[in-house]
Amino acid sequence: MASDQLPTNSLTFSIDEGKTWNYYYFSETDVWIYNINEISNNNFYIYGRDNNDRGIILGLDLSAVFDR
C-alpha cells in the first residue's frame, strides 16, 4: 500500500496476512503515487510524479523480503 492522497516515500506491506506491517522506503524525497503494478513475482513498478511534477517510474525488487 501507498498513500494516494499525500506524497510519500514508502510502501507499507505485510507478509503474514496483516498480523505485522513493514515499511519499505524507496526514495529520499516524497513522490505522488498513481499506480503500483506487479510485473513479475515480487517485482513491482511504481508510477507517479515527483515534487517538480515530472513523471517517474520506480522499479522495486522485493524478492529478498518475500523469500522464506
Image (cartoon, helix red, strand yellow):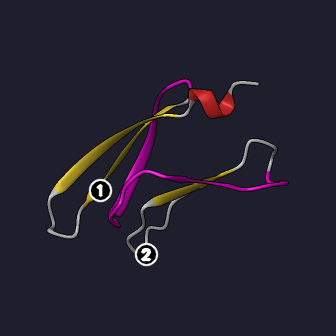
Which residue bears the numbered disc 1?
Answer: 48
Q: Viewed as shown, does residue 16 lie left or right of 46?
A: right
Cα separation between marks 1 and 2 = 12 Å
**Residue at image point 35% right, 67% down:** 30
Residue 42 belongs to magenta span: no
Segment colored magenta: 18-41
Depicted 13 relative to depicted 50: above or below: above
Q: Earlier in the sequence, mark 1 or mark 2?
A: 2
Q: Residue 66: where, in percent of width, then height? A: 67, 31
Which residue bears the numbered disc 2?
Answer: 5
Disc 1 element: strand
Q: Amino acid at mark 2?
A: Gln
Depicted 63 relative to depicted 50: above or below: above
Disc 2 element: loop
**In this orientation, which residue lies closer to the viewer: 9 or 49?**
9
**In this orientation, which residue lies closer to the viewer: 41 or 28?**
28
